[in-house]
Image (tube, rainbow, N blue to C red):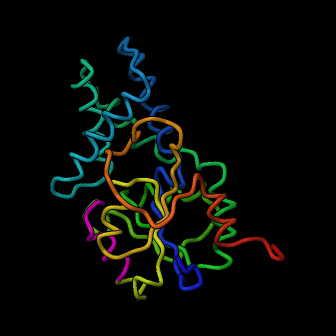
Amino acid sequence: MDFSAKEVLTFDCYGTLIDWESGILNAVRPILRQHDLEVPDERVLELFAELESSAEADTYRPYTEILASVMRGLGSRLGFTATSADAAALAESVGEWPAFPDSPQALIALKRKFKLAIISNIDDELFAASNRHLGVEFDWIVTAQQARSYKPATNNFRVAFERIGLPTERLLHVAQSLFHDHVPARSLGLDTVWVNRRHGRPGSGATPPASAQPTLEVPDMRTLAELLSPPSGA
């Protein structure tokens, strides 16, 4: 891949820059304990992936409602009835989901060389809360709320293309989820970087399994920054 041709890096946020698996588990575990349930973390994430993608495939509704639906679905699948407080817990926790430790510094380094955009399955208000953890100002932010659809719909990418106004060969999409990001991005002719945050762990975590051929794979954002924006003199 000719990195010199790239002007804009577009990013997924949750799972790529924000450690949403830790955030999801930290929100769900106390609720499971309240219902005297012990469920392996990977099972919780697997159910989350299934329930979230199913809810997002229906007619658009805000992500806060998607997360409430997921929590009610977890209750149904695991044998408890989610209270209204349970249903609200995931959305209320999003602003506390941590950035991966390497995300802020990597974004700062990449910002020196590229314009940066977000394409995320999220509501505007929830992303604003998460953005506080990332340490940079993005040049473009495209949320599901703005696009009125959820990835893997290609519409979210098309909205971003229209705003950015550059040919796709000038863009590079960076994401963890094969299902939500790499499949649609590659179908539109985008080069992509797979930030394989789950390297060495079985399964696909909080995202459904999918088959895709990213242009490049890296284990984390630090590696990507070192590759695309090395320190002066390196």
The spot of residue 54 in percent (x, y) is: 21, 45
What residue is shown at x 33% (from left), y 48% (from top)? Answer: 64
Q: Main secondary structure of the magenta part?
A: helix
Q: Which residues are magenta?
A: 151-161
> Which quarter of the image is occupied by the C terminus?
bottom right
Is 19 one of the magenta-colored residues?
Answer: no
The spot of residue 116 in percent (x, y) is: 54, 74
Up the image or down, 196 lies above or below 31; here it is below
The outermost residue toward the left is 59
Query: For this view, does 54 lie left or right of residue 164?
Result: left
The spot of residue 217 in percent (x, y) is: 52, 59
Q: Quadrant of residue 105?
A: bottom right
Q: Quadrant of residue 83?
A: top left
Up the image or down, 111 lies above or below 151; here it is below
Query: For this view, does 56 lie left or right of residue 111?
Result: left
What residue is shown at x 25% (from left), y 32% (from top)? Answer: 72
The spot of residue 131 in percent (x, y) is: 54, 59
